Amino acid sequence: MKKKIRIIIEPGCISCGRCQDLAPAVFDIADRARVNADADIQAHEEAIKEAARQCPVQVIKVQEE
Ligand code: SF4
């Protein structure tokens, strides 16, 4: 069975918007990036992992549970 993932955004986000471009249903940017409370994270796993790879300050951590 596929593992569930969990997103952690560590301090240091520079609000560049990249994660929101890649996964707009998941990430919101205000003063910093946040995960939408009602986002279907499992459905957007690949886009989330890509956002984590492309985050310029590497603050998006994806954990598999
Ligand atoms: S890609 Fe990284 S730095 Fe840019 S808004 Fe998202 S979390 Fe912040």
Image (spheres, grey):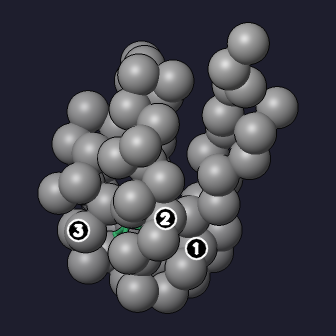
Q: Which residue is mark 3?
A: 17
The residue depicted at 74 percent of the width and 47 percent of the height is 63
Measured along the vertical axis of the image, is residue 15 above or below residue 45?
Answer: below
Asked if the residues shown at circle 2 and circle 1 are in contact, with their CB atoms under 8 angstroms apart, the answer is: no
- Residue in front for this viewpoint, 32 or 39: 39
Q: Please, what is the three-letter code of the amino acid marked with disc 2?
A: Ala
Please tell me whether mark 3 sits on a helix, a strand or a loop. loop
Q: Earlier in the sequence, mark 2 or mark 1?
A: 2
Question: In which quadrant is the N terminus drawn?
Answer: top right
* Outermost residue toward the top in this view: 1
Q: Which residue is mark 1?
A: 59
* Outermost residue toward the front in this view: 1
Q: Is mark 1 within 8 Å of ligand 1?
A: yes
Q: Please, what is the three-letter code of the amino acid marked with disc 3?
A: Gly
Quadrant hosting ligand 1 = bottom left
Q: Is mark 3 within 8 Å of ligand 1?
A: yes
Looking at the image, residue 9 sits to the left or right of residue 46; the answer is right
- Residue in front for this viewpoint, 23 or 3: 3
Q: Earlier in the sequence, mark 3 or mark 1?
A: 3
How far is disc 2 from disc 1 in space, using C-alphas?
7 Å
How far is disc 3 from disc 1 in space, using C-alphas?
13 Å
Q: Which residue is mark 2?
A: 52
Neighbor class of circle 2 (other Cα within 10 Å; few <14, some 14-19, many 20+) is many
